[in-house]
Image (cartoon, helix red, strand yellow):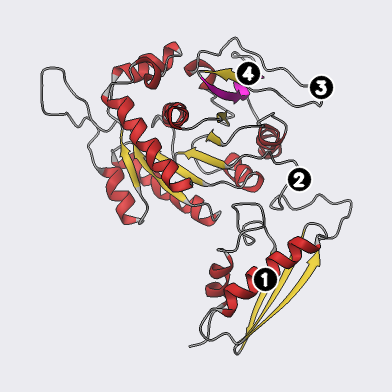
Amino acid sequence: MPLTQDELLNILKKVNYPGFSRDIVSFGIVKDLKVDGSTVFVSLQLPKEDKKIEAEISESVNKSLSDVSGVSDVQIDIGIREQSGKSQATTEPSKKLPDIKHYIAVASGKGGVGKSTVAVNLALAISKKRENVGLMDADIWGPSAPIMMDAVNERPVATGNQKILPIDKLGIKLMSIGFLVNEEDAVIWRGPMVHGAIKQFIEDVEWKGTDYLVIDLPPGTGDAQLSLAQTAPLSGGVIVTTPQDVALIDVKRGILMFQKLNIPVIGIVENMSYLDLPDSNTPIDIFGRGGGKKMAEKFDVPFLGEIPLDPDIRIGGDSGKPIIESKPDSKAAKAFMEIADKVLEFVE
């Protein structure tokens, strides 16, 4: 049975652009792919002329396709994207990308599931295990990291080379749109403005020395998510949900979004999973329980863990003392630490 174009394209999705964790397909490098009998013709288009990169990509593509049963010859044509007055494709690797080893996106299909709480505590949990951790609050319409990190009155400053210095808080570097707009002002932005803000937060913030950047995305599957995927080579995405069916429906959207953008799904976190009463050995499943695990099994993605419904999580978030810091021995804090272990195992 002859190989299909889609099958070969999936193989090329395993070929990374040199120096990045993103593949050449999601970067828009593969412009055409044809099959003629046992010969495969691949047309590649690079953002600039670079003989070393051309040679590396050509070798990787040739090896990946030549190892496929039924392929006897691979013909590769490499061109350079025209440099005209038109804007360049947003999927090409940016020269301004900071030298960050791991970009970790935290997303949710809908609001109200505690995504930002998970992002903040996950970043802090990772910082207990690794050095050089950052948190980027990309929730343009509802930035909450300044409150949760006790940094409401902080204001970033610019360096001499016009880079924005992130705020150092609780041992991590922090950047949020909340630092740049007044709390009383409504943020009413459309696609291009959202893309510009996301791009600026990645490229124009001084993330130098940051090895792990946790990114809190807005809920849903809109402009911000697409812009981030086009700007940064994401190591993977964490999807946050609650157990009830109305939230689980949107988990599918989040998984499909990451898959369509060719971003690995690190796993699913079930937040507000259960309530432990002080005088009872039996947890109460207020919103149901186990839905996140079932969705993980259904879509064959990892299940990272359950976060209990704990008043101290809310108190810590409102007071700027996340539970990882305020009550490190609590069941919730330990759950975040275990999730951090799984996330680190995945991205490393």
Tell me the residue at 39%/15% (across/down): 316
Quadrant for residue 317, please give it: top left
Residue 59 marker: 1
Q: Which residues are magenta?
A: 171-180
- Indicate yes or no whether the magenta region holds residue 172: yes
Q: Percent x, y for residue 239?
A: 42, 42
Pointer 2 residue = 95
Compared to 322, does 283 lie above or below? below
Left or right? Give the position of 73 relative to 268.
Answer: right
- Asked whether residue 121 appears in the rendered view, the answer is yes
Quadrant for residue 101, please give it: top right
Q: Percent x, y for residue 242?
A: 33, 36
User: How many marks are shown on the rendered structure?
Assistant: 4
- Tag 3 or tag 1, which sits nearer the N-term? 1
Pointer 4 residue = 179
- Tag 1 or tag 4, which sits nearer the N-term? 1
- Indicate yes or no whether the magenta region holds residue 84: no
Q: Name the one closer to the observer, 96 or 180.
A: 96
Mark 2: which amino acid? Lys
Residue 160 marker: 3
- Select label 4 or label 1 by which is in front: 1
Mark 1: which amino acid? Glu
Q: Name the one closer to the observer, 295 or 320.
A: 320
Mark 3: which amino acid? Gly
Gap in angstroms between the C-alphas marked 1 and 3:
41 Å
Left or right? Give the position of 91 relative to 86.
Answer: left
